[in-house]
Image (tube, grey):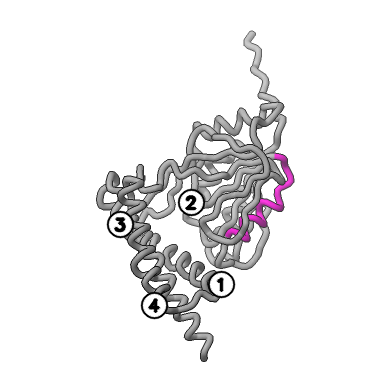
Amino acid sequence: MKIPSKKPKTIHQLSVVLATYNEAHNLARCLDSVRALWDELIIVDGESSDETREIAQDYGAQIIKTTNKLNFHINKQMANDQAKYDLILQLDADEVVDEELLNFIQKLKQTPELPYDAFRIRRKNLFMGQWMKKGGQYPDPVIRLFRKGQACLPMKSVHEQMQVKGQTGWADGHLIHNSNPTFALYMKKFATYTSFTAQILFEQKLPLNFMQTLKYFLFMPVTTFCLLFFRHKGMMDGWVGFVFALMSGLHHPMAYLKLWELYERKKT
């Protein structure tokens, strides 16, 4: 008689947490990739007008409704704070956990002593239908797996990393980031990110003068482009690598123009 194998004992329970806003087109794919992992699922939703919350309910998520903030890291940290278990996996709705990373986390849950307080995860980024290999977009490590209370988001930028109190290691596997499958979707995010940068500069009272104009229209765009396209070898991604480096550079003059608009609006 064949004796059924025992299910491995789970020592650490895992909270999977997300912040969402109109992610109905992504959410199910993301949650399907981690369905076997979570002991609780927490989703902080910022006033989605599509079926995001209905999909989350179908997966048994604990849903917390809040406002959609320009700095969406505020909602991400809110989700982190609501987690009750000792391990947290924080995801974006357009990310998928691959099989290697899934197996790594499953084994980690069965490890008596966690080797690190937080783990860097390699990420594969999609841009205009192509998986980028260079240009600072791979391996693109992000800290998303951590012990509760040992990592947090500063909530000052939309591109910031987690701040970790203890030691950090590497996880096996990847996050598959379906971030910008089309240029149109990229431009929507570009508009959001440049508006957020302009708001930060406005709060910092950055002056509008010749030197700042030269910096934001010439020095910063050229430096960013050269850094991504040449130093980080974005040229190896071909035309897509060129467009990514170019648009990354154009972030700076666009944010500066929006800052000018904010100052003009303040006068009226």
Question: Which part of the image, by quadrant, shows the N terminus?
Answer: top right
Pinpoint residue 130: horizontal percent, then vertical percent: 33, 47
* Residue 160 located left or right of residue 66: left
Nearer mark to the viewer, of 2 and 3: 3
Nearer mark to the viewer, of 1 and 4: 4
- Identify residue for label 3: 243
Q: Is residue 163 visible?
A: yes
Nearer mark to the viewer, of 3 and 4: 4
Rendering quarter of residue 115? top right
Secondary structure, magenta segment, majority class: helix
Q: Nearer the viewer, residue 78 or 268?
A: 268
Q: Amino acid at mark 3?
A: Val
- Identify residue for label 2: 94
Q: Disc 2 to disc 3, how far (Cα)?
A: 21 Å
Q: Amino acid at mark 4?
A: Phe
Q: Amino acid at mark 2?
A: Asp
Find the magenta span and give its range: 73-86
Q: Disc 3 to disc 4, how far (Cα)?
A: 28 Å
Q: Earlier in the sequence, mark 1 or mark 3?
A: 1
The tag on residue 204 is 1
Pinpoint residue 207: horizontal percent, then vertical percent: 49, 77
Residue at far front of view: 211
Q: Disc 1 to disc 4, how far (Cα)?
A: 18 Å
- Identify residue for label 4: 210
